[in-house]
Amino acid sequence: MSDADAPTTSKPNASKIRRRDLLALIGTAAGSAVMYRAMESLSLAAESTYTGPIKLDGDPKGASVLILGAGLAGMAAALELRKAGYRVQVLEYSGRAGGRCWTLRGGDTYTELGGATQRCEFDQGLYLNPGPWRIPYHHHALLDYCKRFNVALEPFIQVNTNAWVHSATAFGGKPQRYRQVQADFTGYVCELLAKATSQRKLDELVSREDQEILLQALRGWGALDQNYVYNANLISGNRRGYDKDPGGGLSAVPIPSEPIALSDLLKSGLWQGLLPGANYEFQTTLFQPVGGMDMIARAFAREVGDLIRFNAKVKSIRQDERGVSVTYEDTAGKPATASADWCLCTIPLSILSQIDMNVGAKMQAAINAVPYVPSLKVGLQFKRRFWEQDEGIYGGISYTDLPIRLIGYPNTGYGSSGKAVLLGAYAFSSVYGYEFTALSPAERIAKALEDGAHIHPQYREEFENGIAVAWHRHPGVLGCSGSWTDATRAQHYENLCALDGRVLLAGEHASYLGGWQEGALLSSLDAISRLHRRVLAG
Amino acid sequence: MRLRIAAALTLLAFPAWAQTVEGRFGSPARFVPQSGEGLYADVCQGCHMPGGVGAVGAGRYPALAADPNLASPSYPLTLVIRGQKGMPPFGSVLTDEQVAAVVNYVRSHFGNNYADTVTAADAKAAR
């Protein structure tokens, strides 16, 4: 793969390195889905345990809660706790509610750590979601809040069979249609299995009776011909498409297309691009808020914005038997203190681990145990929707082994003749994510264009402007999301989530849905449920 | 007004990507640059910033410039390999040679003038 470009002179065993890289590539599988898996315990699906709106029955008798952070976790807690009768205040570092639930539009400016300021030059109505951009249908808590707040949703296309899968080192760098790679890969696997069955090589594994059923299934599943062969014909054409589509009238006869040779297909690695959409968290149907992800943040802010003190940088969190006292500074560095009976802290651990706080050794060790993964997103505005007009790609994602990893097409406004913004890079949790972060915003955009032009040569003519967000440079987060391993989860996760005196933590980092908004919400709802029980217990 | 037009024209140009660090984006599985300078520019400056000046937001990235914590080489060796708090561990994506090179680079630049150096063997021992 891209290892072909890498100098290997300092290594004694080049073939070994290539294999290691290949395995790692399979691990990263051209997208975030498998990397989530790699970081998370394999035994756990990204499933929401939400069972409906939270019910905090019982009188908290005027108890007060100080919430740190006005992302989704903090704002959901503020909403529900106030409703339950608590006195609530929220401190937020930035001047904006929503945290990583965030959308950049034309006219917005963004200053990252290091001082680089970008002004978003997108046209009216166009946007980039630098953080989360898709909502699985089974993220019930987030979807329920969207419903309660009347946040309009539209389909997010994960799998578009007419989008591309691409490798710089396969097929001369020419991208292949997802549809054809999928049809051919499935077809060949079915053909091979059918052969093995017919040659009685599966007799020890499958009964004769079941073999008959299996053969029928393989023929249908793989689009095989009557001889159980995957070939260029109208059967496979119905899967992979045709050289000439069926038409009407006199030249209507379809012409089948030739499958990619099996060996070329296997060596290309392009089958990896089929994997993300197969995962539970990316299966149909996914949603996106109409107009940008921050429609959710804005909806929460409409409910609880009056409780939030913005531009408040937390300096210390101290608790004793009577309550919690938090010192913070405004943008001018003026110190202030906020106090409450309890504290729900949603500050990312990348930051919280640097804040002076007197919690127990176990919680502190847990706070210190979670590094943050990198992530880079680049939004690119083009003069026209060439991916639709020239290539018939309406929404969805093309995958590549180039550092940009993928290109995400807008899942809205299909067929419009004007400008449009696509996601030109999403380097999540990989070496490439760190490398993009170390570049200036202008360099990140240039690299996204360089890579993307291999898939869409139209980039060179049609590009207008771009904006790049590398999450380790984000002043309010210092990373994308918490990176747990099985070992750190086993040692620290429960200690991170448990109530420590009067302090409780919440956020995506305190969930098994790392990096997902659903994780932030479920963590928050779980935390305030436990807090409420503790308060009622007196 | 003329300035404004110039700015607009700049925006419309197709910016060229220039490979300024040999080996950057060379592999999805490991960092390829071998020199300390190259590795610093490829990885470390993402957070610690060009020149090692660090940065401050809601939290901070420590400055590495004129950093007394670098007096003992074992401290940066361990940090690079194992990480600490928000700093990710890089031991699995850097060779012993690379770890030594970047530690030696940071300890001899940005106002740090530690004359002693570490070797790949030191990095291996610190794993």
Image (cartoon, rainbow, N blue to C red):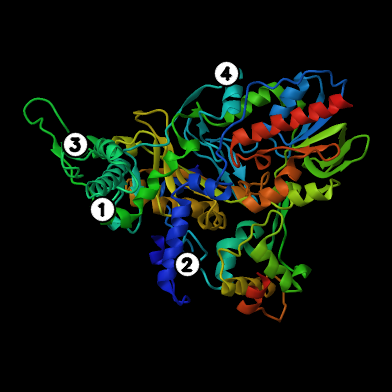
Side of A228 relative to A297 (left or right): left
Q: Amino acid at mark 2?
A: Gly
**Dividing the picture into quarters, in which one does residue B69 lie?**
bottom right
Q: Locate residue A151: give its quadrant.
A: top right
The quarter of the image holding the N terminus of chain A is: bottom left
Q: Amino acid at mark 1?
A: Leu
Q: Which residue is mark 2?
A: B23
Front residue of A432/A241: it is A241
Q: CA distance from mark 4 to mark 2?
A: 49 Å
Mark 4 or mark 3, earlier in chain:
4
Give the alpha-carbon distance from disc 1 to disc 4, as whole Å: 49 Å
User: Which residue does the numbered mark 3 point to in the structure image?
Assistant: A235
Q: Which residue is mark 4?
A: A150
SS type, badge 4: loop
Letter of the chain that mark 4 sits on in the rendering: A
Residue farthest toward the left in the current orientation of the protein: A250
Residue A378: x and y in percent read 49, 45
Mark 3 belongs to which subunit?
A: A
